[in-house]
């Protein structure tokens, strides 16, 4: 089996597993009073799904032509394997819905970037809100006690607004907030670059249209000059005689 074959066969199953992981990870955080049996099932589910991704990574390394080079160029995948809490971020590449949207988007690179930026931004905000809520709820002096507070805090952070009325009080919460700040800067940069690419492409299209029109007008003018330069005698000489002279 080649790497491409493995990717095609596992794309949808791994996407579903990643979505299941996110649900199992988020449910106990959103509802801290969850039934003990359901909470245990969620914990077991996250462990099993993480094990599937470990198997996926190991298989990819084995299928690579140059294994050490593959590991070096996929350090983020290795980091995600080593830190299971980052596993939901894998949805950026694996969730089936995002892949379908990507195939139905415009064929240009700009269209694909727009899909990944929008999907990645929503996912980043949601996962960061869950992570902050998980470590901040119930801590002394914390003002982030429910999902609404966490989502509002994540949105104000990723958009670089930062009202300051809500802030993490734990070290882990501050680390998540710092990562979210960097993610917000990256998203804004991607949006700006995508818009700039669109404007440059539009200007280039207009410039090409004007150039083609000028070329067509120049060809028409040259054709008119050639027609005007033809002598009437030359035209009659080129015409075939259809009848003999009278009286012959």
Image (spheres, rainbow, N blue to C red):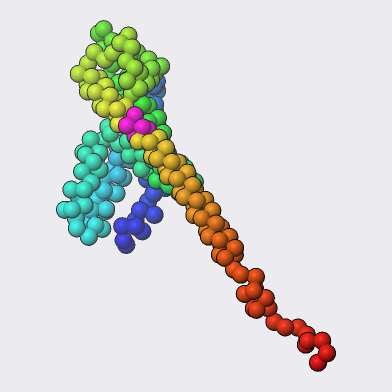
Viewer-closest of 90 and 83? 90
Q: Residue 111 lies in what quarter of the image?
A: top left
Main SS, magenta region, reads helix
Percent position (x, y) of residue 83?
A: 23, 35
Residue plotted at (49% across, 47% down): 210
Q: Is residue 48 above or below residue 143?
A: below
Look at the image and give the residue range highlighted in magenta: 187-192
Residue plotted at (20% across, 43% down): 75
Viewer-closest of 217 and 182? 217
Identify the residue at the far left of this view: 68
Residue plotted at (69% across, 82% down): 240
Quadrant holding the N terminus: bottom left
Percent position (x, y) of residue 73?
A: 21, 48
Percent position (x, y) of residue 228?
A: 59, 63
Q: Is residue 244 above or below residue 16?
A: below
* Left-right relation of 13 to 178: right
Q: Is residue 77 above or below residue 223?
A: above
Percent position (x, y) of residue 116?
A: 39, 38
Quadrant holding the C terminus: bottom right
Residue plotted at (54% across, 53% down): 217
Is 200 magenta? The answer is: no
Q: Residue 235 lies in what quarter of the image?
A: bottom right
Q: Is residue 190 visible?
A: yes
Identify the residue at the far right of this view: 247
């Amino acid at each position: 089996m080649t790497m491409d074959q493995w990717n095609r066969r596992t794309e949808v199953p791994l996407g579903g597993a990643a979505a299941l992981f996110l649900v199992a990870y988020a449910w106990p955080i959103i509802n801290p009073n969850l039934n003990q049996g359901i909470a245990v099932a969620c914990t077991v589910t996250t462990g099993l799904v993480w094990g599937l991704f470990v198997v996926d990574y190991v298989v990819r390394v084995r299928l690579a032509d140059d294994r050490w080079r593959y590991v070096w160029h996929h350090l983020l995948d290795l980091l995600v394997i080593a830190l299971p809490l980052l596993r939901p971020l894998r949805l950026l590449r694996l969730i089936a819905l995002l892949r379908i949207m990507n195939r139905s988007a415009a064929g240009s690179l700009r269209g694909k970037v727009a899909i990944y930026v929008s999907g990645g931004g929503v996912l980043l905000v949601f996962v960061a809100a869950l992570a902050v809520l998980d470590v901040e709820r119930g801590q002394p002096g914390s003002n982030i006690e429910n999902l609404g507070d966490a989502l509002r805090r994540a949105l104000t952070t990723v958009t670089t607004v930062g009202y300051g009325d809500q802030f993490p009080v734990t070290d882990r919460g501050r680390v998540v907030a710092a990562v979210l700040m960097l993610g917000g800067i990256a998203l804004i940069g991607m949006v700006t670059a995508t818009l700039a690419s669109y404007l440059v492409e539009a200007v280039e299209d207009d410039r090409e249209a004007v150039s083609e029109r000028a070329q067509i007008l120049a060809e028409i003018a040259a054709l008119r000059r050639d027609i005007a330069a033809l002598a009437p005698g030359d035209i009659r000489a080129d015409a075939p005689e259809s009848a003999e002279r009278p009286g012959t």
